[in-house]
Structures are given as structure tokens and as C-alpha cells.
Image: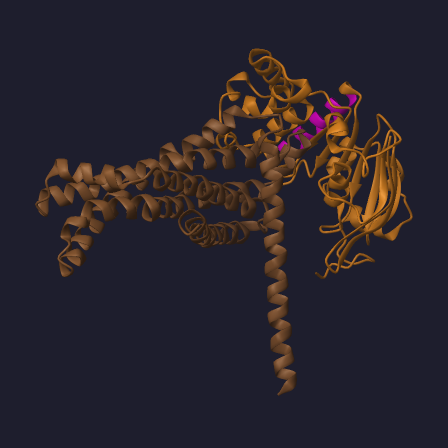
Chain colours: A brown, B orange
Amino acid sequence: MSVTIISAIRALGRLVLRALAALGQVVLFAGSTLTHIVRPPFYPREFFSALMNVGYLSLPVVGLTAIFTGAALALQIYSGGSRFNAPEVVPQIVAIGMVRELGPVLVGLMIAARVTSSIAAELATMKVTEQIDALVTLSTAPLKYLVMPRVLAGILAGPILVAVADSIGIFGGFAVATQTLGFNSTTYILNTINFLTGEDIISSLAKGAAFGFIATLMGCYFGLNSGRGAQGVGAATKSSVQAAAVLILTANLLLTAVFFTA
Amino acid sequence: MIKFDNIHKSFGANQVLRGVDLTLERGQSMVIIGGSGTGKSVLIKTVLGLITPDIGKIYVDGQDVTQAKRDNFLSQFGMLFQGGALFDSMPVWQNVAFRLQRGHLKRPKAEAREIAIEKLRRVGLAPDVADRLPAELSGGMQKRVSLARAIAAEPEIIFFDEPTTGLDPIMSRVINELIREIVVEMGVTAMTITHDMTSVQTIADKVAMLHGGVIQWCGTRDDMAHSGDPHVDQFVHGRAKGPIETLC
């Protein structure tokens, strides 16, 4: 019996050590990437290409997700608020819900699904086909040429996407509330504007930057550390999305605690 | 001169290199032969800093490259990868001129493109290939583009990793002859990894056989036929039976 317990503790210990080692590697990778952001050479073409992929091309999916979520949120709040005879809180709660939580988190998860996976698959394929080695032999550091432009694009595109998601989400709620729930459009807009504070918006944009950083960093990390062959590429892609989603949700909790419980 | 001094490298429990000692003189073309998985590619990658040896030193013109900053010595190397390793997101000419568009070798775009087209011509490709993507080319054409990229910045040392793998015998012959011509014409030091004995006959001044993690035999191309080493003899004649085990 005691042998079984010791084996279980050993297995748990190994698991914890592996997790800590992986975390340490990710932290070192992140640190190394951030130091490269401010050190030349810079690759503007790669950066703008990454910005296009992370930001501009994510707009349709982010917009669609936000508008439906905002609209559904308005219906739910109206229904829930009616139980307390307070259906008029719809504009305020839609605004705060979208800006503080749903906008950033939905953008983070959408970037993780769309961008993290594509970065991981692209870099893993480059690794498998020796393109990463070729870059090194051509005197170009992969961290500078491949990772830094993507991560910087993530940090800059994240807040912009969140701002778009927040606005479209609030518009979704506005459309439903004014067209089907009988709200006055001017009152709805005034209630939304008056209720939101600068801190709400800053926290939302900060979360966007943090989630953009996490999503692109995970894609790069797992892509560059992928195993061999098609299986390696598949595993890297899957792991990158899982890690990005978990880290985004964890970071969301931490950032919410930092912004709103201090 | 490239000198490998007691190079050891393991991957987990798999001890691939167990003390490689080898010297390649400047201007010489050496071919390294050996079975699959014997560490030939690993050996080349240790010179380029892509793999760090566990033990041992590698000297290039007297400088220990295992201790040197990689950026300081990489510009003198060119490399043709086994699968071409062309960047599939950019057209052929940008692949060839990659090094000429960055770092201290940076040239204006028009000049870099012109050099790329000249190098493409040198490896037998028409200028209209320049704007195509690597995926639109055949395997033989991709190898030629990769060769053009390897020579674009006029390196002093070129590595060729399995240059004829996956090509038909005629294209293999073409690539082998092209490599030989370029090596002689540019006066570069070349190290080639291959299983292909036709490549050995065309490219090599000197041949080394890697087996069991060490250099089993090293000599001139002409000496190889009467090396007296049963491993070399078995490999050169492609015999299934002999001292080299064929079971995996």
C-alpha cells in the first residue's frame, strides 16, 4: 500500500517538475522575445505581414462573434433583470460586460483559435522542412525574423481588435434592445456612455495587448519546438491553442483582480 | 581549413558521434559517406552551430567555432539542404537573394534581384523562374534554386547535404556535375554528405566514411577502390552482407 502511495507521489512530482520546466522555458522564451523587440535588426515587412494576419484578417470573425454575443447578452440581461423589476439596466450591463470581460476574452480566444494555430503550424512546418535551419545558416536569427514581428503584431493588434469587439458587441446589444425590447435609442446610448469609465476601457485594451502577446507567443513557442513529421506539426498546433486558451483565461482573471479589486 | 577534434554528440541514449577526428584542407572537396542514421548530417550541423557537440572542438581556419559567436563566422558558409529548405512564402529570386537583402551584405533590391537571376542562370535555370514560388517547381529545379542560394553570397565553404536525394539518375548526374563545376570555378572548400556513389566519383577529392560514430576510413577518391577496409568495401559495392549491420 505504501509503495503504491510513494509511486503516486513520485508520478505527481515528475508531472509537477515537467510542468515547471515547461513554464520556465516559456518564460525564458518570452523574456528573450521581449528583449529582441527593442534591439535591431528590425524586419518591417514581416511585421506588417503579421499585423495583417493577426489584426485585419481577424476582424470578420471577431466582429461576428462580438455582435451575436452582445445581442444575446442584451436578451439575457433583459430577461434576468425583469425578475428583479430592473430591465432598464440592459445598456449599462451590456456595456460593462462587453468592455470588461466578454470583448477581451472573446478576442483572445478567437485569436488563439485563428492565429495561434496558424503560426504554430507554419513555424512547425518550417522546422520540419529545415527552413528554420536554413534561416540560421543565412545569418538570420529565427527569434528576430519569425517570432518578434508576430509577437509585436499580437501586442498591437490585440487592443485594436478588442476595441472593435467592444464597440460591435455594444452595438449588437443596442440593436436588439432598441428593435425588439422597446428601448429608446438616445437613452440607450447615453446610459452606455455615462456608465463606462476610463478604467473600464483601459483595462479592456490592456487585456487585449496581453492576450495578443500570449496568443502569438504560444504559436511561436510551440511551432519552433515542434516534433518531427506531420504528427509533430499536428501536436504543436494542438498544444499551442490549448496553452494559449488556458493562459488567456488565467491572465484574464489576474488582470481583472489587478484592475478591479485593488 | 576545417578540423573536427574529438566530436561527441548524443541524443538521449542514442550516442551518434563518438569521437570524430577529421581535417578538411582549404579548397578541397570532401565527401562523407556512411549508412543512414550514422550522424553525417549531425556532423555538418555542428560546424554551422545548428547542433552543439557534447564534447570536442571544431576549428575553421584556426578559430574554434564551438566557442565563437555564430554571426561572426556564418557569412563564410553556404549550405544546400537535403530537401532544399526553400522559403515557400517567397518567390525564387528572394530565396536566392535572401542573404543579399539583409545584414552587412545588404544590396539594393534591384541589384540583389540581378545577382539572384545571374546565380539562377549559373545553375541552369531561366530568368523567368525567378518570380515563381518554390512549390511551383519540380524537385530538380528546387535543388538548383537551393544551390543558387548557397552560392549567392559567394561563400568560402559550402556544405551539400544529400544533394541528389529524391532525384532521377539523369538529374542526379546534372546536379553532381554542377556542384563539381561550381566548386572548381569558385575555388571553395566543400563538404558533401551522400549515399550516392556516383556523387562520390564526380564531386570528391577526398572521401571519409562515418561508421559507429567515428571516421572509419579517410582517403582519396582513387584510394577508395582498394581501401582494404571491409566497411568501405561493403558500402561502396552495396553488399547486404558484411561488417555493417543492415538490421535496424
The residue located at (76%, 19%) in the rendering is B186
Note whether residue B180 is visible.
yes
Q: Quadrant of residue B143?
A: top right
Does the magenta run of residues contain B90?
A: no
**Residue farthest right in this picture:** B228
Q: Looking at the picture, how far across and down is residue B183, in whole percent?
A: 76, 24
On screen, B166 above or below B73? below
Q: Looking at the picture, how far across and down is residue A152, in whole percent?
A: 50, 34
Q: Looking at the picture, how far across and down is residue B36, in whole percent?
A: 71, 50
User: Which residues, given as a range, are shown in magenta?
Assistant: B170-184
Left or right: residue A224 versus residue B162 is left
The residue located at (44%, 44%) in the rendering is A211
Note whether residue A131 is visible.
no
On screen, B108 above or below A191? above
**Residue farthest front in this picture:** A262
The residue located at (50%, 24%) in the rendering is A45
- Quadrant showing the N terminus of chain A: bottom right
**Of residues B200 and A254, the one drawn nearer to the viewer in this rendering:** A254
On screen, B2 above or below B231? above
Left or right: residue B160 versus residue A231 is right
**Of residues B212 and A198, the one drawn nearer to the viewer in this rendering:** A198
The residue located at (64%, 40%) in the rendering is B165
